[in-house]
Amino acid sequence: MRYASGASSGTVAAGGNGAGPLTTQLYSPTGVYFDSSSNGLFITNVGANNIVCWVLSASGWTLVAGNPAGSMGSTPTLLYSSYGLTLDSVGNVYVADSSNDRIQFFSAGQTNATTIAGATGIAGATNQLLYYPYAVALDSTLNLIPIQLLLRNFVKPQPANGRVDVGHGIGCMFNTMAKPTLKTKPNGNVQVQSIPEAWITSTKYTAPQPMSLQSKKIRNGEYRKMPSGSSSVSVITDCVEPSSKNNAKNIKNVKIMKPNTTSSKMKYSKVLLVVLGSVAIFGSMGALSIGIYSLVTRSATSTNSSTTNTSLGLRWYTTGSIVAGLGGVHGSASNQLYSPISLALGASNELYVADYNNNRIQKWVSGGATGSTVAGQPDGVSGSTLFHLALPAGIVLDSSNNLYVSDSANHRVQLWLNGSSSGTTIAGTGTLGSSLAQLNTPRGLARGSSTGTLYIADSGNHRLMRYASGASSGTVAAGGNGAGPLTTQLYSPTGVYFDSSSNGLFIVNEPASTVVRWVLGATGWTLVAGHPAGAPGSTSTMLNRPYGLTCDPMGNLYVADTSNSRIQFFLAGQANATTIAGVTGTVGATGVLLYLPYAVALDSELNLYVADTSNQRVVKFTRY
């Protein structure tokens, strides 16, 4: 958006045509830089893994860095969930390539980058390594200042100067000020007008200014300062009073104090450092000094009656809203579903539902009261012709909203072009079998966006099949060695997700209650979630007959833990999960409960959609 100085409303400067990789679209833009020489905006599309330039008044963008189709990667020409950027005075581009843990330098007009900070794909806390860098800045002498989002394990904080915990955010900047001040409003709410950087210097919020705490509940936390040029980190405990340090209450009075240097109350695990950022000018020489301030949450997760928080700052309301189906009542009317089993989101966040027992695929536009049939027959009649489906168990879309359907009872995969009334068989023969041209009860689907390669969970054959675009037969990508818990085997795979950054497949082994990763070309899998021997369970490290899964651009995993009636969130690389929807082992049809959920999907804003299968509905849990 572009706001003229003093204007009360803005105009669209770029995008506004839905999320997607088209040159007229943006995809969850994060970083932006205005280049006055070209009258253009350099924009980071975090969801599309690229940097584009949109000249003001133009109808679309030109590619600056990354892949135009949105493919992620770690080569010098690719990016992976890059977040922030800046330019120097001669037009060179500097990119915080977040999920690759590096800073990339693109010479003006070039698409091949040089890594100038960090090491590709290697996270760490040494002076040579970075961990999820989210922003980058240059001082007047072009010194580089990467700002990092870090995860750490803490057992006890070290004493330091006090801070006031005021919530969290990303990318706020500060200006210098003489001393900390607080302001109490007539209603008793507190506004923090400044926070000390040290007892002789301080910083002031300018986004917004001042920051009103009002009566909002906050989590216990602390700020940490990482001085530039130092690998050591000082830990600063929170100073919210008069509430207990371990149980922050609604704030009415706040005071700044030095913490007890012998306190050992604060214990942390998998803490969150959310970038705030601070710039201070010291001395008559005007030297630029950078400190990075980060909020540390008290535990890996924090929940209350209305929200769920993960340790990356991703938060969803725990009460969902029905966006498809009536809930509790199955049927074949246009406003009903019968065992929804798979979900996909279109380019404009329209919802596609595999309506399993109605033998059809339904499309629901946002806010719509009814769905429209885009594959199969509206009345739910099954069949084996090109106009029919029989127990569709998996769906995936391409960028043109062409629909790929796992037609499980017909042992085939169908392609329904956008707007078509019939499908084309692109995998399987329609007859159950185990040859490379046949399928046995196919279920989940995934697709490589850059190559068009289709990955099929060939459940009855206990294997993942790979079909190149246009191929009449496939190759075994994973499994194919019988059913079982061995690392060379799969066991009735259902959900599948292709991760282009690792060239690997995330696979749900439903009867084994596990999620595994099988890198293409490897001879076996590595465990991602669940018990390696296939034992079901309901703890935070266990699953019970999960069915569907998806990942976000940061590599975090979301699993429909079906028989536990919950959705589990696994931080990238972690085996301990957070329940972000549903209640473990408790079935129900309220807004906070689920009943055997089979699928999970994310839209471009990371709102969570759940196929609440036995409740005959799809529920949306809004991220905020």
Image (tube, rainbow, N blue to C red):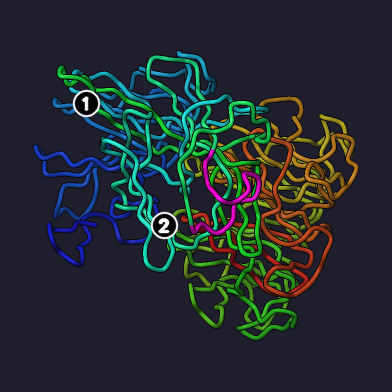
Horizontal side, residue 282 vs residue 160: left or right: left
Q: Are marks 2 and 1 in contact (CB under 8 Å)?
A: no
Viewer-side label of 2, 1: 2
Horizontal side, residue 519 vs residue 357: left or right: left
Can residue 455 be spotted in the picture? no
Where residue 552 sits: x, y (%)? 55, 46
Horizontal side, residue 220 vs residue 456: left or right: left
Residue at the spot x=61%, y=83% of the render? 335
- How many angstroms separate mark 2 from mark 1 (CA)? 44 Å
Q: Which residue is mark 2?
A: 190
- Identify the magenta region: 238-252
166 w.r.t. 163: above or below: below
Mark 2 secondary-structure assignment? strand
Q: Quadrant of the N terminus?
A: bottom left
Mark 1 secondary-structure assignment? loop
* Amino acid type, residue under disc 2 in the picture: Val
Q: Which mark is residue 174?
A: none
Residue at the spot x=59%, y=66% of the render? 620
* Most common secondary structure along the magenta stretch: loop
Where residue 172 sits: x, y (%)? 35, 43
Residue at the spot x=57%, y=49% of the render? 219
Q: Which residue is mark 1?
A: 92
Can residue 322 be found in the magenta stretch?
A: no
154 w.r.t. 458: above or below: above
Can residue 105 be spotted in the picture? yes
Compare residues 132 and 379 and report the one nearer the observer.
132
Q: Earlier in the sequence, mark 2 or mark 1?
A: 1
